[in-house]
Amino acid sequence: MITARALAPAVALAAALSLAACSGGGAPANDTSKRGGGSNPGGGGAGITIAMVTHESPGDTFWTKVQSGAQQAAADSGVTLKYSNDPDAARQSTLVQNAIDSQVDGIATTLANPDAMTGSVKAARDGGIPVVALNAGLDKYQAVGAQMYFGSDENVAGAAAGKRIAEGGAKHVLCVIQEAGNVALETRCAGVKQSVPNTENIQVVGTDDASVVSTLQAKLAQDKSIDYIVTLGAPIALDALKALDQAGSSAKLATFDLNIDAAQDIKDGKIEFSVDQQPYLQGYLAVTSLYLAAKNGNDVGGGQPVLTGPSFVDSSNIDKILEYAKNNTR
């Protein structure tokens, strides 16, 4: 059940649900294969193997929720799920090729850097393997060759966040990008800038919390006119809170995405709101769609994106959402 206040319609989501009833740094593929089972052993997917390949960076709690949804879908359907990840786009593309070579029945992948993924996605399609995109790549998934997209419209999400903070009086926004070259993150900041023209992007190394804190603290100390920070991931929001405290800044903080700590900080009034894209749902629907394609030839969404967000999480609904966050189901 979606309890957060929706910002945009989830196109084709109802249809998808009726059918269904962020290791890195060049490390080897993190094979967390799961045989479906749980309350429905087998689930009709015996013999079907699905690969999920993401640009997950080490320590980013966002991806725990994506994996949790994907693993639940595998358990519900009885398929084997093979998960691997690398934040480097070229190495992520290699992981997709590895999945092709292992003759999986379907591939779900993120497209944070679509150009780098085009060759491997095409190779999968040429080999008769269906490919769906999730989380990143809304504007490019069709051109790259993916048949479906499950995720948020990042331009809508960024614009909605910008509108909200502008209505709250923001004049100078610092938008924090934690992954260089990630088109989804850049789109979010561009959306914020639509409503607050004085929005300044700052690049940080998202895998190094101490560096994030020091970079933001220095910027806040140097420019006292910054009255709002927008972070694009929950772990970065926690770093931003430390930087605000160290700089003695009164700037407000909003974030994209949730983890348990960020959800608690919303409840405690330290973070104004989060823009939620429901990563659990992204993982669940991506695996389920590939299972249905392999089993029945079903086409979820008819090639159009299935939107899993965005929605606001704030003081009005955090009590309910906090429980879902603790269960890794948001």
Image (spheres, rainbow, N blue to C red):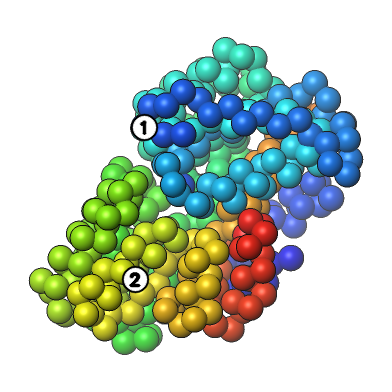
Which residue matches tag 2? 241
| Residue shown at 69% from the left, 55% from the top | 13
| Residue shown at 66% from the left, 64% from the top | 324
Q: Is residue 99 left or right of residue 1?
A: left
Indicate the position of residue 221 as horizontal and vertical percent values: 14, 73
- Is 205 located above or below residue 192 in the figure? above
Q: What element carries label 1?
A: loop
What is the total number of numbered labels drawn onto the structure image?
A: 2
In the rendered image, which quarter contains the C terminus? bottom right
| Residue shown at 10% from the left, 71% from the top | 222
Q: Which amino acid does label 2 sit on?
A: Leu
Is there any visible trace of residue 26 in the rendered image?
A: yes
Indicate the position of residue 200 as horizontal and vertical percent values: 21, 65
In the rendered image, which quarter contains the N terminus? bottom right
Tell me, for residue 265, which label it has, or none.
none
- Is 24 located above or below residue 4 in the figure? above
Q: What element carries label 2?
A: helix
Which residue matches tag 1? 25
The image quadrant that residue 38 belongs to is top right
Residue sitting farthest toward the left: 222
Q: What residue type is labelled 1?
A: Gly
Is there any visible trace of residue 193 in the rendered image?
A: no
Give yes or no for contact between labels 2 and 1 (Cβ–Cβ under 8 Å). no
- Is 299 located above or below residue 91 in the figure? below
Q: Nearer the viewer, residue 169 or 220?
A: 220
| Residue shown at 74% from the left, 49% from the top | 16
Indicate the position of residue 22 as horizontal and vertical percent values: 46, 47
**Distance (Cα) linking label 2 and label 1:** 27 Å
The image quadrant that residue 303 belongs to is top right
Indicate the position of residue 264 as horizontal and vertical percent values: 53, 73
